[in-house]
Image (cartoon, grey):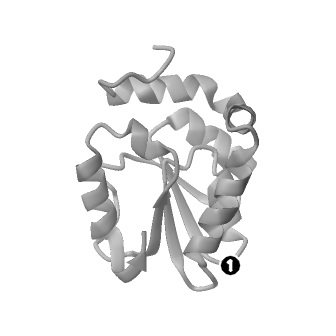
Amino acid sequence: MTKADMNKQPSEVASMFDGVAAHYDVTNDILSAGNAVLWRIATVKAIKAGPGEKVLDIAAGTGTSSAAIAKGGATVTALDFSAGMVEVGRKRQPHLEFIVGDAEQLPFDDDEFDAVTISFGLRNVNRPKVALAEMYRVLKPGGDS
């Protein structure tokens, strides 16, 4: 598979991202005409996560946004369903926790995170309503999503 289609077969989408992981960040910057950086800044400002807070970044890819969120002092968990992206992320962002996982079946307890974010990845989720319910489940009452 060379691109994600509307059927969104998880194994095929993950495989596609595994294949582009090493060059994903540069490609994303080019394809977004540099706007990815601006979107990342806006996300960090919206979350306002600081020391003592736990943030879950879903579809984190190589952890570029996760690292930006962590600069505020929060503990960030980067989750992605592409093992290739997680492998690259662990090398580039060794200070972050990376987990291979599925947004539709988050491997966390209820009410565990102060904030949950997903940037571009929601478009690649097979069942968005299920993923959103999972995000709500792991989000502490009153948390940011």
Q: Quadrant of residue 50?
A: bottom right
Q: Residue at x 27, y 68 (%)?
A: 137
Is residue 75 among the parts visible in the rendering? Answer: yes
Point out the image quarter for the N terminus: top left
Q: Residue at x 36, y 46 (%)?
A: 102
Point out the image quarter for the C terminus: bottom left
Q: Nearer the viewer, residue 129 or 76?
A: 129
Q: Is residue 88 left or right of residue 119?
A: right
Q: Residue at x 51, y 45 (%)?
A: 120
Q: Is residue 138 left or right of residue 115?
A: left
Q: Position of residue 136 (x, y in %)?
A: 30, 67
Q: Position of residue 15 (x, y in %)?
A: 47, 24
Q: Position of residue 100 (x, y in %)?
A: 46, 45
Q: Position of residue 17 (x, y in %)?
A: 53, 29
Say which residue label 1 marks: 73
Height in image: 112 above or below 40? below
Height in image: 116 above or below 5? below
Is residue 105 among the parts visible in the rendering? Answer: no
Height in image: 33 above or below 42? above
Q: Residue at x 47, y 44 (%)?
A: 121
Height in image: 139 above or below 31? below
Q: Is residue 74 left or right of residue 117?
A: right
Residue type at numbered disc 1: Gly
Q: Quadrant of residue 72?
A: bottom right
